[in-house]
Image: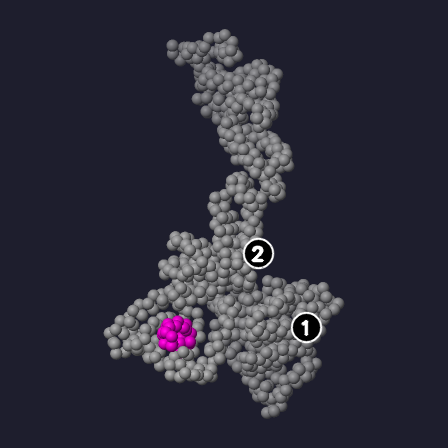
Amino acid sequence: MTMSERKTIDLEQGWEFMQKGVTKLKNILEGLPEPQFSSEDYMMLYTTIYNMCTQKPPHDYSQQLYDKYRESFEEYITSTVLPSLREKHDEFILRELVKRWANHKVMVRWLSRFFYYLDRYFIARRSLPPLNEVGLTCFRELVYQELNAKVRDAVISLIDQEREGEQIDRALLKNVLDIFVEIGMGQMDYYENDFEAAMLKATAAYYSRKASNWILDDSCPDYMLKAEECLKREKDRVSHYMHSSSEPKLLEKVQHELLAVCATRLLDKEHSGCHALLRDDKVEDLSRMFRLFSKIPRGLEPVSSIFKQHVTAEGTALVKHAEDAASSKKVFVRKVIELHDKYLAYVNDCFQNHTLFHKALKEAFEVFCNKGVAGSPSAELLATFCDNILKKGGNEKLSDEAIEEMLEKVVKLLAYISDKDLFAEFYRKKLARRLLFDKSANDDHERSILTKLKQQCGGQFTSKMEGMVTDLTLARENQTNFEEYLSNNPNVNPGIDLTVTVLTTGFWPSYKSFDLNLPAEMVKCVEVFRDFYQTKTKHRKLTWIYSLGTCNLLGKFEPKTMELIVTTYQASALLLFNSLDRLSYSEIMTQLNLTDDDVIPLPPVDEKKKVIEDVDKDRRYAIDASIVRIMKSRKVLGHQQLVMECVEQLGRMFKPDFKAIKKRIEDLITRDYLERDKENPNVFRYLA
Amino acid sequence: MDSLGPNRFDIFEIYRQFCELRRGDTYVCGEEGYRQDEESQRAKYSRDRLNQLLKMVESRMHTRTAIFDELHKLMIQLDLTVDFSEFSCFYDFVFFMCRENGQKNISKLSHANSLDANASISRAVAAWRLVLAGRFRLLDKWCNFVELKAILLQFSFWLKYSCLISGTYFDMGMEIWHYGYGDMALQEYQRHNISEDTWQQVLAFSRCVHENLEGYDPEGAWPVLIDDFVEHMYRFAFYTLHDRKENLMAIF
């Protein structure tokens, strides 16, 4: 058979043939007895369409067949599908819908195969919706549009039943919800608008009811357990039968209703809220609290603020306790370290290292660490604590590792202290005493803490202290050299054992040096040492500080000879009696060239007050230097900005008070370093 | 310049020269295209001239107290009500006449052990009362405050000094320590006088602040003395407007 011989098929005739195929398909879908399509049946149907579409106009029936294709679906839906759905409710309508949708998809698949030729030419050429889409759109417009609300309500009601603990057919829900997705043909709009929005609203209502009951009846830990369980179940729910895109939205709703809405009431519950959990060390509940509240926006802020309050209160209680009982001042720093260990562990474990809690911890410690205890600034207590660890026979009997760890912790604590310069001054005083009176227990530890301080506070902070430690090492070497010198030059040996510690002036605290008239024996010593020292160095001035010296004297008394360990002053006074038996007070004073104050020891000056005053003076210089530095580089600067930059520059060492800065600015104006801008008195100019 | 007779003290002539120098200074600043070093040179020049003028004034004036009579004489002759820049010039002139030895402060302190800063304060106060009368609503309160502060300072220094001697701190506590005067060192106590900058800022303060302290910007670069005054007003003065004297005594 050739093309030219082909008989023209008219529409009515052709469609009648096609109708038979369609009816057979419907019967199969309805489960009526009907033999399956054979490949021959299929070929006939396809060929008919092909023929009807390839006839010369006016016998090209493409458009008509395209319309008929759609009408076939519409007819089937109106006559069969809708009536069967309309009479059903609840779970039954869901089952029916799932079945009808499955059938419809089969019908689309088959019919579109019969009409396939339309897709290839007619539809492609005219850019019409393809057959598959036409088929699915029919279901959407006729079935879905009419019934989606009813179906959605049935689904939500089943979800609520499941929330209440009933068993439901999850597979059925999964299938129904798939329809909402598939009906969008790649777009999620239908799922989101027709199902998800209502489901979220219903979820919010459900959990809002729950929350308002639980918050009344349950303790905070119980409530959180329930909330966590609910969240887990909802997550599980999504993974079983909803579209995965619903998970964040659903969880957000649940979190909002269960946590955000009643956060304050939950956290502030009197006997079981956040305060109580911290008080009772309920680590597990606190971890749960963190997990839950980390999920809601700004949820952690109230938790961290309660944490800060709690730590501040605990720390303040330590301060108060230390003030009430004099003896506990000694253990104060140890207690603060323990407190820090404890709550740092909380931050790391319960609160998963979150910055908000690190900040809260820092701020809490800054509050009470800067209070000081009974007149002693924390800077001093910290320095004393270090001294006790580092000096020989200190209170702390610890292993090397434990000492290292302790030093690490003290230095960490120093970060919270704003008066770091004050700490440095106290520390230097105590370090000097350890080094000069041979009280330091271990050189390695001395150096180790300086390294730690350097890391935290910068090289300038420790340069003097390092210089002091180095001085001592050099002094020991120097002493060995001196002894060698004496053995090589026996003629200069003064006949007295002499140990000299040479120090660099700038590193050490200032000590008084008097022009003491030394006994001849000692003068000899000094001269010998001076000669030795000049062989090594030129142009260095040695200042002798006798007030720090000690002497071992042999007193040849009547009963027996006694060894006396005395200060250099005392030794000088005693040696006067080698030549005379009796001396008056004023004779001693004149012969030694001392004043009353040196001869009669006064009660020691309040060292603490002096240190504080010295630091205060240093601060004035530091502020001056900082202002000049800033203005030198900026030339012209507003008052506020100058103050801010100054605070920032000095913050590593101490927190300068605004008034102090202002006073320094005024002073610098008087000294012609700065002037006010003529137009704007809030602006300063640097005068070169 | 020395158009004055060898021993005559003529406040009008001094004032004329002062204004001239001051105007010359501003003229230099306003000139366009001037060079930096040129400006500083001119500023140095006029500073030197001012110092010369001051030395001359000192050599011819026999008693310091008479200066207020002279200033008063000058003030009633000048028409200061019209032009603010004229008044501002006169205000600076008052400071110029009250200071000594080219210092930038109104100060009487010359040696380290002097505990009498009150003389310089009372001179500054007298000068304010003269020049700002009728121009500063808070003038009376301001002057009282400055004097009170000087007394408190002296008192707290005495307290500190006696504590150092006796070796104990007795609890004088209360407002003085609270008020921040407690830790005042001698050095700082001595420096308690009125600087040129403070003097000038008081004029600015008197112009921008209302009786209820409205117009005072706590963020501004006011001298600490003015900040302290405002703080003092809020702490004490506002609720004791009826009997201020009694309340000031309560501070002790």
Chain of the residue on which disc 2 is drawn: A
Residue A301: x and y, percent?
A: 56, 46
Task: Report whether residue A546 is seen.
Answer: no
- In x, y percent, where is residue A143? 57, 21
State which quarter of the image contains the N terminus of chain B: bottom right
Out of A474 and B64, give the one closest to the viewer: A474
Looking at the image, residue A520 sits to the left or right of residue A273; the answer is left
Q: According to the image, label 1 marks what residue?
A: B144
Q: Is residue A11 above or below residue A326?
A: above
Q: CA distance from mark 2 to mark 1?
A: 41 Å
Q: Is residue B68 magenta?
A: no
Left or right, A309 with respect to A51, comes to right
Residue interval drawn in magenta: A543-572
For disc 1, the neighbor class at 10 Å (few under 14, some 14 to 19, many from 20) is some
Dot 2 crowding, Cα within 10 Å, few <14, some 14–19, many 20+: some
Give the number of the disc on residue A541. Answer: none
Image quarter where the C terminus of chain B lies is bottom right
Q: Nearer the viewer, mark 2 or mark 1?
A: 2
* Residue A331 horizontal side relative to residue A435, left or right: right
Q: Check disc 2 and give the amino acid type.
A: Lys
Q: Nearer the viewer, residue A114 or A489?
A: A489
Depth order, front residue of A688/A122: A688
Residue A556 sits inside the magenta stretch: yes
Image x and y of residue A91, in percent: 58, 20
Chain ID at mark 1:
B
Q: Are marks 2 and 1 on the same chain?
A: no
Mark 1 secondary-structure assignment: helix
Seen at 45% across and 58% down, the residue is A395
